[in-house]
Structure formats: structure tokens, C-alpha cells
Amino acid sequence: MIIGHYGLALAAKRLAPRTSLGVLFLASQFLDLLAHVFVPLGIETMVFDRASIHLVMPVAFTRAAFSHSLLAACLWAVLFGGVYFKVTRNGRGALVAAALVVSHWFLDIIVHGHGLPIYPGGPLVGFGLWRSMQLTVAVELWVLFGGGAWIYARATRPLDRAGRNGFAALLAFAAMLYAFALYKPPEPSLQSAGFFGLWDGLIFAAFWLERHRTGSSREAARP
């Protein structure tokens, strides 16, 4: 899954109003960021096969125990949430961030074929939503990302023009990247680092956006 992770992070802002959207984006993509390090180092491997089960996004892990196994996701979630709590003392934000780290695995098994391990050396799972372009777009773009953007828009309000236009620009840029990924998937190689870097750039954009938006009056009234 690609853009759906960001959608869930947008929605999570309502549960953790004091936590920066940048942190929520980072948590939701943390496992992929690890994979972007582990794959070039040879610790994990991916294959690019247009004839495989992954008709929409023909990228599959062949070894992913350290970043994309359920056990690893849980351990990384504890570490991420623990570090965040240590720095901020924001218990709710730490729990939400940790949940987002784990959520990455559960969203990925929806789209991947049988390629994600439960634990190192364990059974591989995946429901293969990437077999269908229509279902992939419906679930990722409209339900998760669109729904998350709607929840975020209701949970926050712009402080200035940058907060209003910047939010719209972030959504448009993410949708553009998603469209490019669907119709021209990058090969999982060092040459595709620039493409993945554009996705990761959304994290920095989210940190900037938080400086120009604040909680809505309804959310601000909550303890």
C-alpha cells in the first residue's frame, strides 16, 4: 500500500491533536523507510516482476523480516512510541504513533500477495488487492486517503493562507505521485531512490503544514 498509509495518518490527527502531522506521517511510513535502508544494504530484497500477482504494483519482498514482518513491526512500534514519549511526554500521541507503525503491516497485507512474514522464517501472508486496479484505487485513494483528508480537515483549521493552500497542495501532490506510481511503477533499485524520496518528502511537508494549521474549535475544547 502507498497513499493509504498517509490517509490513515491524516485521520489519526483527530486522535492525537497535539502530535504533529509530520510525526504521524513518519510513523505510518516508518517500516518503508527502514526497507529503503535495508534493501540497498542487502539485508532485505525486493523483486520487480510484471508477470507476478502484483498487477497494479509489481513489487514484492522476497526477504523482509526486519522491516515488514508483524513481529518486527510490533517491536519497531514500541521503539518509535517509546522514543516519542521520552521526548514529548505525550502519552496519547505516543500510543497513536506506535499504532500507526503497526498499522503499516496490516494495510500492506491487504494489497500484497503472499510475501509478508508474520515473524522471521514464519508463514507469508497477503490478500493480493493489487490484482485489481479498480479495487486498489477505491480502497487506497478514495476510502483511506480521501477519508483521512476529510477527517483531518474537520479536526484542524488553517491559521493563514499557507495553511489552507498548503493542505490542498499536499493532497494534490500526493495524488499526483500515486497516479504516477500506478501507471509507471519504479523498479526497486538504487535508481528509484529519487521516486521514493518524493514520497518521503511529504513527511517534511507535513511538519511545515503543522505550523500553519491548528485544532478546530471543537477539537480544542477537548481535554
Image (tube, rainbow, N blue to C red):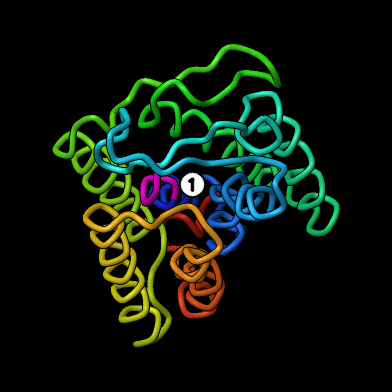
Taking the spot 61% from the left edge, 59% from the top edge, the residue there is: 23
Q: Give x and y (percent) for residue 195.
A: 44, 67
Above or below: residue 194 compared with residue 121: below
What amino acid is found at the position of numbered circle 1 in the picture?
Answer: Ala
Q: Dot 1: few (<14), some (14–19), or many (≥20) neighbours within 10 Å?
A: many
Asked whether 216 or 75 is in front, the reply is: 75
Residue 80 counted in the magenta span: no
Question: So how many labels did they put on this image?
Answer: 1
Query: Going by the image, does 221 lie left or right of 217?
Result: right
Q: What are the residue bounds of the magenta stretch?
A: 1-5
User: Dot 1: what SS?
Assistant: helix
Furthest-right residue in view?
86
Residue positioned 26% across, 70% down in the render: 172
Q: Is residue 35 above or below residue 207?
A: above
Look at 47% across and 50% down and name the residue there: 9
- The percent position of residue 211, horizontal first and vertical second, equals 54, 79
Q: Residue furthest left?
A: 134
Q: Give the x, y percent position of residue 221.
A: 50, 56
Residue at image coords 48%, 47%: 12
| Residue 223 visible in the current orientation | no
Q: Main secondary structure of the magenta part?
A: helix
Q: Which residue is mark 1?
A: 12
Could you tell me which quadrant the N terminus lies in? top left
